[in-house]
Image (cartoon, rainbow, N blue to C red):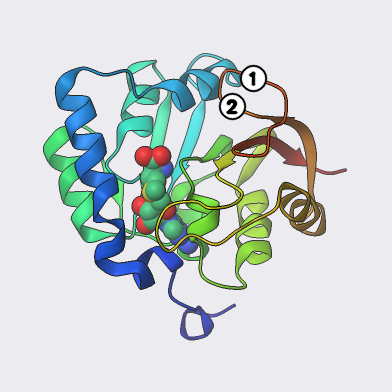
Amino acid sequence: MTTADRPPTRWALAGDGTSGYGRCFGRLVADGTDVDGEARLADSLLARGGRVLDLGSGMGRVAAALAARGHDVVATEPDEALRAQSRATYPDLEVLPHEALALDAEEVGRFDLVVAVGNVMVYLGEGTERAVLSHVRSLLAPGGRVLVGFHPRSGPAGARDYAPDELAEDARSSGLRVDHRFGSYELHPPADDYCVFVLSAAG
Ligand SMILES: C[S@@+](CC[C@H](N)C(=O)[O-])C[C@H]1O[C@@H](n2cnc3c(N)ncnc32)[C@H](O)[C@@H]1O
């Protein structure tokens, strides 16, 4: 898929409908509320000092928490307002402006873990899910894994419904294997309202 063919992300299409995300997490971080659940699970999937890609890093909370745990984190976030919020909240965290399919392995390297949490998967451009998963696979270091988490239905404004079985099928078609599915970042059993997958390269 060339740059010209790429449809806009559902996040971009939702416009102001998504502004609550930045405000909400800004408030939670300012209040000292725990927003590190995704990062704790990601950390447990990594050896110390792992290379991590936070795809769709938003206001930066997950990438910053992983960097604070000693990992070498590359964060990327196409939404300019969220990059500005991320810079203001976590000044030490560098954030690339790249959309997933624009990430070049020669530029960013390969990763022990790619994190696409907090509903990134339900905000990708329409019809790009397999292309993004396949591209993510190409960015994995040997033994690398992918952590995704999203609301499969009735998610936030502008998000698509994405049944867990469809995600699993898309992952398989993209050269990834489903290692685990959970219902939360605290590893509850698979549930209807949230799904967390750990994926790795097949074969
Ligand atoms: C709800 S926010 C989650 C942000 C962050 N991961 C978190 O959990 O706090 C969803 C993010 O997905 C990003 N996104 C959607 N499609 C993307 C794509 N194709 N490449 C990179 N990021 C994307 C959006 O820009 C948005 O910041």
Where's residue 78, x and y in %? 33, 60
Q: Residue furthest right?
A: 203
Q: Tell me what residue is drawn at x 24 percent, y 64 percent.
A: 16
Foreground residue, 60 or 97?
60
Q: Residues within 10 Å of mark 1 (few under 14, many from 20)?
A: few
Considering the image in quadrants, where does the C terminus appear?
top right
As drawn, the label of residue 187 is 1
The CB of the residue at mark 2 lies under 8 Å from ligand 1: no
Residue 154 at x, y = what percent? 53, 53
Residue 155 in sight: yes
Q: How far apart are labels 2 and 1 at the CA level?
A: 5 Å
| Dot 2 and dot 1 residues touching (CB under 8 Å) | yes
In the image, residue 26 sits, relative to residue 42, either above or below, namely below
Task: Name the disc covering residue 184, or none.
Answer: 2
Please state if 109 lies on the left or on the right of 98 as rendered: right
The quarter of the displayed image where residue 32 is located: top left
Residue 91 appears in the picture as rendered: no
Q: Residue at image x 53%, y 84%?
A: 5
Percent of width and height locating residue 189: 72, 23
Q: Amino acid at mark 2?
A: Ser
